[in-house]
Image (cartoon, rainbow, N blue to C red):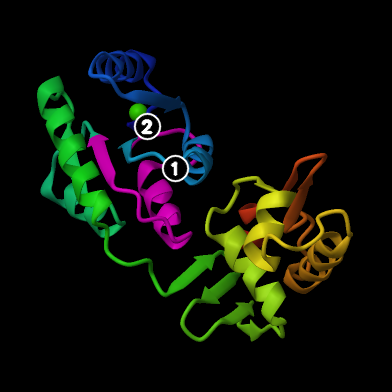
């Protein structure tokens, strides 16, 4: 299975990756918090193995943001810290299990496999997705930006919900047309571009300088979760 290792210490990352590969898994390694978070949302691994002390974003931040983005991927935290308090914080931030360094490789594998099994029967998706200044409530279908409710049409909502199902992942034009308009729609029309443009205007936060929906030329579109980041001076 596909496993994501977020660890800046090459010695540990390489050791774990090689070992998991030998067990027949496909490990992907990210070396800092920010790229690790992006990978967790796009690679869709069965389990994330997450170090606590990372450059950029800490492991705790990665875990919190992963959950806030609606991801239910099981997270196993790795840390040299072993006080009860650190474990409690990690688990409160949404980690599913915690292992302290140094650890026995067999124990790591056993815990990853247990988490992956649990992941298969994962609890239902959270009703509410929060990405910085944007909140999407799946039950009431209310979308709010900076606490103001946006007026979206049914198609705009469907498009947003699809993009939010994997923030940062590139959706091809064909898959969006298929999911939102049904396969029968003629993909040659520019209906998709018109909707993306409208949705972009509605979702753009005041003062934000990053496009909320990025165009991937010749391929499709992806959400840019950073666009709703809460600025430090707000
Ligand atoms: Ca580290």
- Residue 96 against residue 201 in the figure, above or below: above
Residue in the image at 71% along x and 50% along y: 174
Ligand 1 shows up in the quarter that is: top left
Judging by the rendered image, the residue that carries numbered circle 1 is 44
Callout 1–callout 2 Cβ contact below 8 Å:
yes
Query: How many numbered circles does the render carry?
Result: 2
Mark 1: which secondary structure?
Answer: loop
Label 1 crowd (10 A; few <14 / some 14-19 / many >=20): some
Mark 1 or 2, nearer chain start: 2
**Relative image position of residue 204 (x, y in whole percent):** 76, 67
Up/down of 142 relative to 75, above or below: below
The reply to whether the residue tagged 2 has its Cβ within 8 angstroms of ligand 1 is no
The residue indicated by pointer 2 is 2
Q: Where is residue 136, by image quadrant?
A: bottom right
Question: Outermost residue toward the front?
Answer: 184
Query: Is 88 drawn above or below residue 180 in the view shown?
Result: above
Q: Is residue 76 magenta?
A: yes
Please give the range of residues in magenta. Answer: 52-78
Q: Position of residue 152 (x, y in %)?
A: 71, 81
């Amino acid at each position: 299975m596909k496993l994501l290792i977020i660890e800046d210490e090459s010695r540990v990352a390489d050791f774990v990756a090689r070992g998991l590969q030998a067990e027949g898994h496909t490990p992907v390694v990210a070396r800092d918090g920010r790229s690790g978070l992006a990978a967790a949302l796009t690679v869709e691994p069965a389990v994330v193995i997450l170090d606590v002390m990372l450059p950029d974003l800490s492991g705790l931040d990665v875990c919190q943001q992963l959950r806030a983005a609606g991801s239910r991927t099981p997270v196993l935290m790795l840390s040299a810290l072993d006080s009860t308090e650190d474990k409690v914080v990690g688990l409160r931030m949404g980690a599913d299990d915690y292992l302290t360094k140094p650890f026995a490789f067999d124990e790591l594998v056993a815990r990853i496999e247990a988490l992956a099994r649990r992941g298969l029967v994962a609890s239902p998706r959270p009703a509410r997705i929060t990405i910085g200044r944007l909140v999407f409530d799946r039950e009431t279908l209310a979308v709010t930006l900076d606490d103001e409710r946006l007026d979206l049409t049914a198609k705009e909502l469907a498009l947003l919900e699809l993009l939010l199902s994997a923030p940062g992942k590139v959706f091809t034009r064909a898959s969006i047309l298929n999911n939102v308009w049904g396969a029968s729609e003629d993909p040659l029309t520019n209906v998709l571009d018109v909707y993306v443009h409208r949705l972009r205007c509605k979702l753009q936060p005041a003062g934000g300088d990053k496009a909320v929906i990025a165009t991937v030329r010749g391929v499709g579109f992806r959400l840019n979760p950073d666009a709703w980041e809460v600025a430090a001076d707000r």
